[in-house]
Image (cartoon, rainbow, N blue to C red):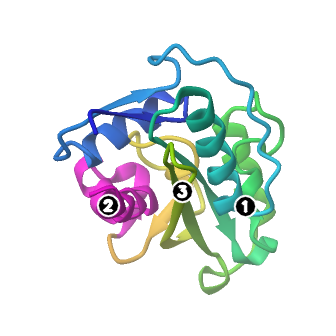
Amino acid sequence: MKKIIFATGNQNKMKEIREILADMDVEVVSMKEAGIHADIVEDGNSFEENAEIKAKTICEMTGEITLADDSGLEIDYLNKEPGIYSARYMGEDTSYRIKNGNLIQRLEGVPDEKRTARFVCAVAAAFPDGTVKTVRETMEGRIGYEEKGENGFGYDPIFYLPEYGCTSAELSMEEKNKISHRGKALRAIRDVLK
């Protein structure tokens, strides 16, 4: 195994992925770097289904081992919204500053103990023989009252980690990768790949 394609075009995500999988002796390339242009319809009903759809599609196109993740934020008070629609919440081109502001506003007056939330990440590995393995991991926290921190991306600035006393956007990349949903899921899939 010399190369793995990761079915994403998100450069922030690729940076995290490469850092977490750095100890594997394998080149991890994004779809763009592999010269793949595919419009994949993520119409699954769960993070796992969406990750599998992406991984299988690209694996079938290329014949290469393909990893794909589907991740998002679940807020308990909002019936687990935005959930599998996290990236498309309020429209695909809406900035995270606006999305984050909207979620904070929707939780106005909600006490700390009811602001529980988690980041979920499912990672699927699709193999040329048709086998697919999927793992799911989470990072538990709460929704904060304002955006804080410059690290991370997406919903990180509003995702408060009580045990660290800060948001996931205030952690260093190294600290975040140790405890994040994506970090845990990638380490779990790495064990599957070995």
Locate residue 74 relative to residue 32 in the image: left or right.
right
Secondary structure, mark 3, is loop
Q: What is the chief secondary structure element of the magenta stretch? A: helix
Locate residue 190 relative to residue 64 in the image: left or right.
left
Q: Which residue shows up at 58% across the image and 51% down it? A: 130
Three-letter amino acid code at the position of disc 3: Thr
> Which mark is first along the chain, 3 or 1?
1
Three-letter amino acid code at the position of disc 1: Gly
Three-letter amino acid code at the position of disc 2: Arg
Other-residue count near label 1 (Cα within 10 Å), few / some / many at <14 / 14–19 / ≥20: many
Q: Which mark is residue 100?
A: none
Q: Which residue is mark 3?
A: 131
What x and y, as percent, mark residue 48? 64, 62
Residue 113 within the segment the image draws in magenta: no
Report the label total.
3
What x and y, as percent, mark residue 63? 51, 32
> Which mark is first along the chain, 2 or 3?
3
Q: Which residue is mark 2?
A: 187
Magenta range is: 165-194
- As rendered, which of 147 and 13 lies closer to the eye? 13
- As rendered, which of 117 and 5 lies closer to the eye? 5
- As rendered, which of 65 and 164 lies closer to the eye? 65
Q: Which residue is mark 1?
A: 83
- The CA span between labels 3 and 2 is 19 Å
Secondary structure, mark 2, is helix
Q: Which residue shows up at 83% across the image and 36% down it? A: 91
Above or below 114: residue 52: above
**Is mark 1 in CB contact (under 8 Å) with mark 2?**
no
Q: Which residue shows up at 62% across the image and 28% down it? A: 61
What x and y, as percent, mark residue 160? 48, 65
User: Which one is in front in this view, the residue at disc 1 or the one at disc 2?
Assistant: 2
